[in-house]
Structures are given as structure tokens and as C-alpha cells.
Image (cartoon, coloured by chain):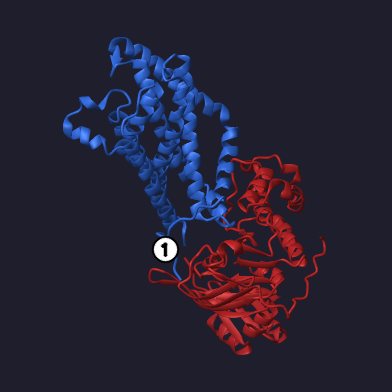
Amino acid sequence: MSRSIWALPHFRWAAIAVLERNFLVWRKLMGPAIVLNFGEPLIYLLGLGLGLGHWVGTVAGLPYLVFLASGVVASSAMTTVSFEGMYSVFTRMVPQKTYDAMMATPMDIDDIVLGEIIWAALKGLFSAVAILVVAAVLGAVPGGWMALWALPVVFLMGLAFAGPAIIMSAVAGSYDFFNYYFVLIVTPMFMLSGVFFPTDSFPAALQAVVQFLPLTHAVEVIRPVIVGQPVTQIGAHLAVLSGFAVLSFYLAVAMVRRRLWV
Amino acid sequence: MTGLAKQSTPLLKSPVVQASGLVKSFGTLRAVDGIDFSIKPGQCFGFLGPNGAGKTTTLKMLMGLADFDAGSLSILGQALPQAARAIRARVGLVPQSDNLDPDFTVRENLFMYARFFGLKRATVAARVEALLEFSELTHKAQAKVDTLSGGMKRRLTIARALINDPEIVVLDEPTTGLDPQVRHVIWARLAELQARGVTLILTTHYMEEAERLCDELVVMDQGRILDQGSPTDLIHRHVESDVIELRGEVSEALFMTLRSMSAHAERQGTAVYIYTHAPMPILEFLADAPELTIIHRRAGMEDVFLRLTGRGLRE
């Protein structure tokens, strides 16, 4: 008789209604969202890429602006997805009770979580597109049109980061809880996954550790695609990202069920 | 649409809700402790009980939102929990606390909710306008939800619960916290729904609401059903026809005399309640006590409720 939170989730088209809701809300706040998504990378790339880049010169055989832009595409998607999966999802799940309202319709938690994960990944994709546009204007996309192949990878990494963020929302007592995840997970990846400098300068032990970070694998694919170099071990990198996406989706569904089921 | 007369309950139709032996525990607490009830189509069926009686849990089980540990529950001929999604497509829920979408306007809330039922915007466009009118919110259609008063939010929540044209509407304390004007408007709307043949299932702890709206009531306490029947049946069964309330200093001697003259008398703080089928002799006797405030009224559901569940605080 009793339901188990660990039952395998279903994939249903009902999830699209969540995307539709979030898109309609986002559209109302599009102005500030676009300023954030285009303005922030522009400042980053100009400040660090041109300013710091002047002193750094080339990194891993690339002008620093090119090296940085291709890394920030990935890190910015991670940050965007994590914010969406934590602050926004928590708001809808707890204070706003949006999910309670949805659950009184034929929608199930499976549909809600699936919709939220896809939505968060799409927001990450949007931020990556914004950075690519800014970088292209600054002449920092040597890969040309082939750089667009980075976008499906960004979407996949978005899925991989959305699940963990929603798990945090499902177990959080308040917004303050997210500080742990940002300080312990997001910021270390931001600094250690090869976004700002190559990881080969690390001691061997740390190099081994960064291989467990999903952002490292995202950068390893996204950077060469954007700068027009061949990708090595693409299968392994995509497998790691896919593994994070699938496992964290399953756990996110289970944790949200645990929180919302009576 | 405007007829408020209650439809006679169709006795021959099979029940829309059939519950037997329902049990739901939270840890060691048996929130719902083996209850049976059945609800006929077109009825207004009420769950009455103090806080913690298990009313909300029961409603959540009806919606397929709460699991149950034992018993069986079927809605519209389909068994829960297996058919939960199919059942929710045909039922509307008005939750205890409003959970409208604050990022949308009044009209957008209705359209968006239809989408969660998988209904197309074009399909519900006319229904949305009709519901805005039904809930007297047409002039607020473009307003954001945050700008609405409590009563408007409640009306919108009720309108939203009707977006899928449900056969059953479940309402968890529909008028708690609202002013009397709004309560009367909501009661009128609910009576209208019932006149259209919609089955209403509600919880309340307003006795007036229960007496006015419900054809059939169950009184719950501590997860069990204490009694069930129409408001009139319950009043006849549990209390005398008249109540005389005394406010002021009632001496023990006077209290004992009153007790011997009536069927039942009790003290509650500085008030005394006297229950009787024959009020006249008592009132004549009390005419000699002008220092007391005397209120004589018909017995109501509140008296039944207090008789069944006691006067102790529930916190």
C-alpha cells in the first residue's frame, strides 16, 4: 500500500507545463535577466581577459582572453543552474507552495522535478549563449560556427548540475543552507576545474581530485570545441556528465518526494 | 446558475466516495484511526472536528496526496492510490492556505492552472471568463495576486479549483480567516455549485458553516468518527432542543437547582449552560434573578460539537 520515495520516476509530457510556467514568469523579468546574462560576462571578459590577459599573455598556447572565455561559458552555466535549482526551486517548493498547487492536479513530483531540471539547464544554456555572443564580439571564439557544438554539452552539464541543486533545495531548512553548497561545492569547482588556469600546474594529488568534479569534464569538452581544437576522451567526459545527470535526477525526485509527500 | 435551493439528494445513485477502515499514522500518532464513510453524488459532506482531529489528513487521502496504511478508498469508482492522477483530473481542491502563483495576474493564474491539467488555453478560454465572473473578479483579471485582499484570493482559489470542471470539489476550511461579508459570498457560490450537481466535501470548524451548507456531517476527534448524520439529526440525537446561557455569578445552590430542573447543565468559567426540552419553567424561575444575563436560544451544531468533543482546549 505504501508508496516508496525510491520508486523509479516516470517521464511524462506533463513536465512541459512546468517549463511553460517558468518561461512565462521569466519573460516578465526578461530585462534584468538579460542585463545580468550579457553584462556580467562582458565585464569579466574585459576586466580579466584584456586586463589580466595583458600581463599573462598566452595560457596553454591560447591568448588569455580566449582561454578564459571558453572556460567561463561552462562556469557561468554552472552558477546559473545552481542558483535556479536552489533559490528559485526552494521558493516555489517551500514559501510559495507552487508545487503543492501543482500536485492537486494530475501532475506528480516526477513531472515537477523533470520540468525544473530541464528549465534550469535551459537557463544555463541561455547564459552560455550570452557569453559566446560577447566573446565572439570580442574576437575570442576561434572555433567559429563550430563553437555552437559546445551548446549541447552545456545543456548536458546543466542537467548534471540541476539535480544536485534541487536535492539541496529538498533538504534545506532555509536559504542560508545553500551557503554550504556554494562554499563547499560551487566555488571550489569554479576555482579548480580549469576555468581560469590549466589544472596541470596542480600537485598530482589535487589533479586526481579534480577529475571527480563534473565542471572539469565540462571544461575539457567545451574549451576545445570553442577554440577549434580536437577533443580528447570525449566519450569519458560526456559519460561522467550523463552519469551525474541521471543519478542526480533520480535522487532529486526521491528527496522532493520525501519532503512533500504526506 | 443563481438558484440556491438545495437539490434533493439522489439516494439511488452509487456513492462518489467510498472509504472503509482508513488508517494513517505519523510515527506513533494515529492521525486517522479506522474511519468509514460514503458520500453520495451532489451532497455537501462536511468533516467537523477540533484541530488535530484528522480532517485535513482525510482530505489529503481523498486527493491521493496522502498515503494510507490500511483500509480502502475509492473515488468516482476508481481506487486510490493507483488511480490518483486520473481522480485528480476530475476533482478540484481548495487548500487551507492559498497557494496562488504570485508572479501571475488573476487571469493568468487560471490559464496556467488549466495547463497543469493538460488543458489547452483555447479550450478553457470561455471557462476562464465565466469563472472570473462567478468569483466576481472580472474587474481584477489583470491584477497581480499580491494586490488582492484575502477574500479575493480565496475566491480566486475556488475559481482555480473549478478550472477542470470537476465533479467533486474538496475544500479545506474554505472560509477560515475571512470577514462575514466574504463568508456569505462564498457560501452563496458553494450553494450554487451544489445546485449544479457538484459534490462538495469540506472541513470546517465553523458550526454555522456546517449547519448551513452540509447535508451530511461527520464529527471527528483524535482520528475517529464520533457520529454522522444531517445537522438536524445530530442535534436531535445529542442535545436538547433549547439552551439557556447564564452569565454572571451563579451560586452553587442555584446551579444545583437548575441542574435538577434541566436535562443537562454545565459550568464553563463564569457562564452556565442549561440544556432542556422545556425551557419555560426554567425561564420563569430565573425571572427572580435579575442580576444574571440570560440568553435563550435553540440548540445548534456547536452544542453537539462541544458535547461530543468536550470543552478542553486543543493545542
Which quarter of the picture shows residue B91? bottom right
What percent of the width, then of the height, locates residue B225? 55, 78
- Residue A216: % across, % down: 31, 33
Q: Say whether residue B260 is left or right of residue A166.
A: right
Chain letter for the red colouring in the rendering:
B
Residue A30 at x, y percent in the picture: 57, 30
Give the x, y percent position of residue A224: 36, 25
B7 lies left or right of B257: right
Q: Could you tell whether A148 is left or right of B280 in the image?
A: left
Report the residue that reaches farthest toward the top: A54
Q: Is residue A124 visible?
A: yes
| Residue A95 in view (yes/no) | no
In front of the other: A164 or B171 = A164
The residue depicted at 62 percent of the width and 83 percent of the height is B238
For label 1, the residue is A4
Q: Which residue occupies 61% across, 56% down? A: B177
- Write down the chain letter for disc 1: A
Check disc 1 and give the amino acid type: Ser
Residue displayed at 75% across by 67% down: B197
Chain shown blue: that is: A
Q: Measuring 40% from the left and 44% from the top, which residue is drawn there?
A: A245
Q: Nearer the viewer, residue A31 or A223?
A: A223
Q: Is residue B230 left or right of residue A241?
A: right
Mark 1 secondary-structure assignment: loop
